[in-house]
Amino acid sequence: MWMWFAKLGSPRWFYEISTKWLPWLASAMCILMIVGIVWALLFLPPDYQQSFTTRILVIHVAVAGTSLAFFPLMAVAGTITLVWKMKLADMVAKHAAPLGAWFSFVTLATGSLWGSVMWGTWWEWTDARLVSMLFQFFLLLSVVALRSAIEDPDKSAKACALLSIVGCINVVIIKYSVEWWNVLHQPSSPLSTSNGSANGPEFWMATGVMILAVYLFFIVSLTLATRNEILQRERRSQWVQEIVRTS
Amino acid sequence: MLEAIQFSSLREFFEMGGYAFNVWSVYAIFSIFVLVNMLLPILRKEKIIKELKRRASFEKAETNSVREP
């Protein structure tokens, strides 16, 4: 068990295993993304009330759902950094923050573009879901800023780890905001059997494909960024110099 | 399968039932988001490898010049 744990924390092990896995993950991501987008754009039947705007929700739901994974991931990585001082965990956390900010921004932008025609407003300050998602965006930006503000890498890793653990509270608020305070944003719709409605089986299948595609995109992009970090931090080691020589 | 397509003409497809601006903006934002976050790390890797190669050749030249005299 501990052997396995130590191996998992080794940047070299991660780099080598991800070299093997990345082509497969990236191809699966491309296929699912193309299937999801073509399905949503061409084949999704219009909703009887929302017409073709459900095509926006396919993207919005997938990106928004994935955006909630960032703080828990960074909190787990941060705990590992604080307790075991594992180098790899901090590298993942470092690159998760800016990517998470992207995810939150796209969630807000796509949600706004849907809300502007379906709610008749781009933004509503009294809606807890909207505001807590905006808060997550700023919180992730502040993690990025905190990282670059503290020069000592050990201290900045610790500070970011703490902020990430605290930030998880906001994820719970985002998740349950639609049930605790019911303003504009609707709760997650249960599956309906009617195909002409926004939450029909076709919608959820297309969205399911898109959720998988976006999750894979999140994993692939974060892995690519982490691999770059490994190359830089381990540049003095024999195995990185070997990679540099042969590439 | 083709009869399941929800549009009868290309123009209808672009119009998106009158929600063209919102639907196409979302797909444009999403495409940029995916492309940027895939391409940036790939380009950065090339830059890092180039930089490390340069440094390696520099260090090699340095150790050679030390050995010579």
Image (cartoon, coloured by chain):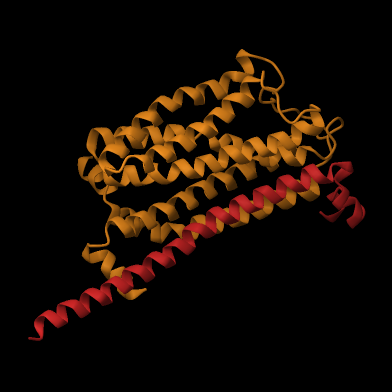
Chain colours: A orange, B red
Relative to A131, say whether A56 is above or below.
below
Q: Image quarter for residue A208?
A: top right
Relative to A107, say whether A191 is above or below.
above
The residue depicted at 64 percent of the width and 53 percent of the height is B32
Image-based side of A117 in relation to A108, left or right? right
The residue depicted at 15 percent of the width and 82 percent of the height is B65
Q: Image quarter for residue A106?
A: top right
Relative to the observer, which residue lies in front, A71 or B60? B60
Relative to A204, say whether A26 is above or below.
below
The residue depicted at 83 percent of the width and 46 percent of the height is B20
Residue A39 in sight here: yes
Relative to A232, say whether A202 is above or below.
above
Image-based side of A126 in relation to A17, left or right? right
x and y percentages locating residue A93 in the rendered image: 39, 41
Residue extending farthest to the bottom is B69
Task: Give the position of the C terminus of chain A as an image quadrant.
Answer: bottom left
